[in-house]
Amino acid sequence: MSLDTLHPADFADPGLHAAGLFIGGEWLPGGGIPVVNPSTAETLAEVPDATVADALRAVDAAEAAAAGWRATPARQRSEILRRWFHLMTDHAEELAQLISLENGKALPDARGEVAYAAEFFRWYAEEAVRIAGEFRHAPSGANHILVDHDPIGIAVLITPWNFPAAMATRKIGPALAAGCTVILKPASETPLTAYAMARLGAEAGVPPGVVNVLTTSQPAPVTNAMLADPRVRKLSFTGSTGVGRVLLAEAAKSVVSCSMELGGNAPFVVFDDADLDAALNGAMIAKMRNAGEACTAANRFYVQSGIHDAFVAGLTERMAALKVGPGTDPATQVGPMITTRAVQKIGRLVQEAVSLGARVTTGGAALPGSGYYYPPTVLDNVSPDAAIAHEEIFGPVAPVYRFETEEQAIRLANATEYGLAAYVYSGDLSRALRVGKGIEAGMIAINRGLMSDPAAPFGGAKQSGLGREGGVTGILEFMEPKYFAVAF
Ligand code: NAD
């Protein structure tokens, strides 16, 4: 596969299928896992199905590269990440096409993802040279306190299918900046982007074994074997809360350090005094970026009584106007869902809400055809007892609930086990901040429909996860503090 020439027609080219496991800087060809285009339900390619033995070979490769990478001057690590950023940017269009093909997302979303993903390499190229320690006088006067930060060791990175590039770079960037070597296991639904990025990484000068990539249809035994290997010291996982819990239990056996970016159930709170147009624009971004397949996606719209009807009417009009179609079609604004199972789940949540009294103002039933399409949907008058209020929809459905008071809005927003993201719209900044302070979530967007930023700490409270990615703190997830008690 050459990224210079890659376009949809290349999927007929067996060169792409040869993309193999990437271990120790070598491509080990294989097959076994079909990659399906959700826009058409056709198979695009096959990627190798790694075994436990392959995974342990990847740990060997990461171990063989570890000492050299750790000893590589930070400036040099930084420059390699910077080159990788530029290569991603140079190949942005091919990467966007690839993401759109294997994930189904509309091209504008895919282009946005590539730009966002590449920024993690630029940000961590900048952070690599700013790793700091600490020096203090011990209050007892007995010694001095010197704190250094070591790379934590080999890191296993597991990513979901919804942002095939960004979820990988958000982990690889800080890990490499910190001096760690990694094994990336992308989701089987969207492995091609990860392999394509690995090629660019090698071109950027990432030494063999520093980044290894493997796909497997057996994530549990393969991951468990790596976690049981004492050379592996870090697990950074992005995915569902259910799988996160299983992995935390597994990592506990070897006391492996864990960062967990898990599910969300974001409230989107609109007060009477909000700018209606701005709230609608924000709602469309918060709901429809990535066709709703985002952990930060607005999952519950709480709208104050005075603005409720106008908000529902405006949202319905905007959602109904969106063009649904194949991801790579330039006219498409909303691509397909990832699988037919995802469409069924969304359908089940909508039907149950309707059976409890919700009113469908647009959409409301899966679209026929060979791809996995669900239309933009607005539900009004949704019962807070409906399953859709508690489960991640992960699709283009906006359930709207009415509220009266600020206290009620906070209580409703917090009525979930999740605590990843929340949105608040109000013309009164003090109120917006007060409400944001009352909401139990790791990230609050005020009068904005988007909060993701490589320079900001991304992560959740409650069962949405542990730790933060991005920002100044993201690199610390891949470092172990080392304290020296120094007498002098
Ligand atoms: P998932 O949990 O099913 O899978 C995520 C990854 O874990 C995949 O690579 C999968 O192959 C792997 N996996 C599954 N079972 C495993 C096991 N037993 N051992 C090791 N690996 C295993 O999630 P998904 O459906 O791919 O992604 C959607 C979920 O991800 C949603 O819940 C979403 O909210 C969450 N997500 C969270 C963030 C965040 O930053 N908080 C970002 C994106 C997605």
Image (spheres, rainbow, N blue to C red):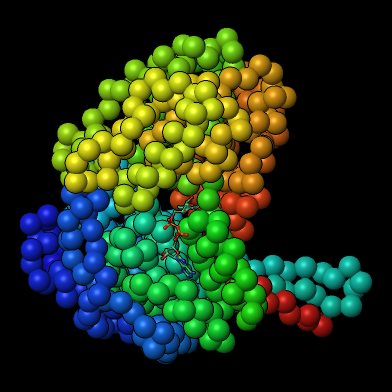
Which of the 4 image quadrants contains residue 396? top left
Q: Residue at x 41, y 23 (%)?
A: 360
- The image shows residue 480, relative to residue 168, as above or below, that is below
Q: Residue at x 30, y 77 (%)?
A: 49
- The residue lying furthest to the front in this view is 355
Query: What is the x, y in percent for residue 420?
Result: 57, 46
- Can residue 91 be seen here? no
- The image shows residue 170, relative to residue 272, as above or below, that is below
Front residue (pair 447, 382): 382
* In this rendering, position of residue 481 left or right of residue 278: right
Front residue (pair 87, 468): 468
Query: What is the x, y in percent for residue 62?
Result: 42, 83
Front residue (pair 373, 62): 373
Q: Quadrant of the N terminus?
A: bottom left
Query: What is the x, y in percent for residue 185?
Result: 39, 70
Q: Residue at x 65, y 75 (%)?
A: 252
Total numbered badges shown on the rendered structure: 0
- Can residue 314 be seen here? yes
- The image shows residue 416, relative to residue 412, as above or below, that is below
Which of the 4 image quadrants contains residue 145? bottom right
Q: Residue at x 56, y 24 (%)?
A: 401
